[in-house]
Image (spheres, helix red, strand yellow):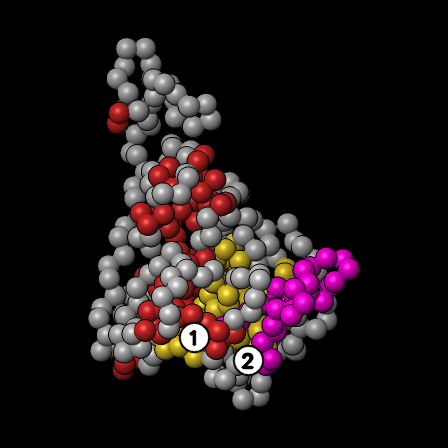
């Protein structure tokens, strides 16, 4: 499903960097691996994107759908891979349906898992999965973006990232650009720094991965998960000096996107609060090696069966006289 067509505001020399980058997932440089892995996932989701004016285009499949991605995998199972492959699923087992995701796939339909995918934000699991696959030293994954933002703030020498004001520095490949998801107020960089220095543990945030910064079309290209229900690219304009060109801020009056307030319908208009700048390769080399990413939980090798079956579970009833498989 395509939401709307883009107008003529597209830069004359715009070029998506991902088709070339995605072939470099095994590159020696960690920064290249980060960008390449994020780009490769974007390709799987059929390359939806938000243009420089905040308009969405190209969305074809959503997170909870059984519709297939470019690799032939159901979209919802790919999100399960992000949770399992990042090692973060076990941190979320208290959420309804999460336990169903441990075995999702193969003959196990896992309907409750699909509910978990819909109801639980997975953008931080996506970032953690990408950086884990890239074996980025000094990075510790988190099911909440504020977890690794706080790591960078409180342990600048031990983290792969340094905290910076996104309006004051130049973004680079491998950086994480983050905004705060709190409707009641705007934090900005000063407000976020104040919160991170205190004891408040939680804060709703979202981070995108900078995959390329191109001066030719004055555009930064970012990829994020759980953006409009998929893995989506975001384009942000740059100044001639390579900084973000007036990052669009969320409306101070709290206006929401409606036909009466079209100016609020810019998907790039957010409370951009921090840029996590990836440290140079020489500094990354001195950090602790990346923790091994645990393999995804394997789906059952043979069909399960049940005696007291749950309608809609997808698990077949056991034949008369046969014991249930794996205790079902």
Measured in 3D between alpha carbons, the distance from the residue under mark 1 to the one under mark 2, in whole angstroms, is: 20 Å
The single residue placed furthest to the bottom in the displayed view is 241
Using the image, determine if residue 48 lies above or below residue 188.
above
Q: Where is residue 91 in the image (x, y as percent from the top left)?
A: 33, 50
Q: Where is residue 112 in the image (x, y as percent from the top left)?
A: 44, 36
Mark carried by residue 193: 1
Residue 265 in magenta stretch: yes
Between 189 and 74, the one nearer to me in the picture: 189
Between 84 and 207, the one nearer to me in the picture: 207
Q: Please name the residue that numbered disc 2 is placed on.
A: 244
Q: Where is residue 120 in the image (x, y as percent from the top left)?
A: 46, 48
Q: In this view, does 156 lie to the left or right of 231?
A: left
At mark 2, the secondary structure is loop
At mark 1, the secondary structure is helix
**If you read the primary sequence from the N terminus, does the residue marked by circle 1 or circle 2 appear first?**
1
Residue 278 in magenta stretch: no
- Which residue range is magenta in the image? 244-273
Q: Where is residue 126 in the image (x, y as percent from the top left)?
A: 41, 57
User: Which class describes the residues within 10 Å of circle 2: few (<14), some (14-19), or many (20+)?
Assistant: many
Q: Which residue is drawn at 22% across and 68% down?
A: 289
Q: Residue at x 55, y 80 (%)?
A: 244
């Amino acid at each position: 499903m395509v939401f709307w067509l883009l107008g003529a505001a597209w830069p004359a020399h715009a070029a998506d960097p991902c088709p070339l980058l995605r072939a470099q997932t095994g590159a020696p440089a960690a920064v290249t691996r980060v960008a390449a892995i994020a780009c490769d996932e974007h390709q799987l989701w059929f390359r939806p994107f938000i243009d420089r004016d905040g308009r969405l285009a190209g969305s074809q499949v959503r997170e909870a759908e059984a519709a297939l991605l470019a690799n032939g995998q159901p979209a919802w199972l790919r999100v399960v891979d992000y949770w399992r492959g990042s090692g973060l699923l076990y941190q979320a087992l208290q959420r309804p349906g999460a336990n169903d995701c441990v075995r999702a796939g193969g003959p196990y339909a896992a309907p409750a898992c699909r509910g978990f995918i819909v109801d639980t934000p997975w953008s931080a699991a996506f970032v953690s999965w990408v950086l884990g696959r890239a074996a980025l030293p000094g990075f510790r994954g988190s099911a909440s973006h504020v977890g690794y933002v706080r790591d960078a703030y409180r342990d600048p020498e031990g983290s792969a990232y340094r905290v910076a004001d996104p309006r004051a520095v130049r973004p680079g490949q491998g950086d994480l650009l983050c905004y705060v998801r709190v409707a009641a107020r705007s934090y900005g960089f000063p407000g976020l720094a104040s919160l991170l220095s205190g004891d408040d543990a939680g804060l709703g945030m979202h981070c995108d991965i900078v995959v390329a910064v191109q001066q030719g079309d004055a555009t930064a290209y970012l990829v994020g998960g759980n953006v409009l229900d998929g893995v989506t690219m975001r384009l942000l304009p740059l100044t001639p000096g390579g900084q973000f060109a007036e990052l669009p801020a969320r409306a101070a009056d709290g206006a929401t996107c409606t036909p009466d307030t079209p100016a609020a319908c810019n998907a790039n208009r957010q409370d951009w609060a921090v840029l996590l700048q990836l440290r140079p390769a020489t500094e990354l080399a001195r950090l602790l090696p990346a923790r091994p990413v645990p393999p995804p939980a394997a789906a059952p090798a043979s069909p399960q069966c049940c005696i007291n079956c749950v309608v809609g579970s997808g698990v077949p009833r056991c034949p008369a006289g046969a014991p249930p498989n794996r205790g079902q």
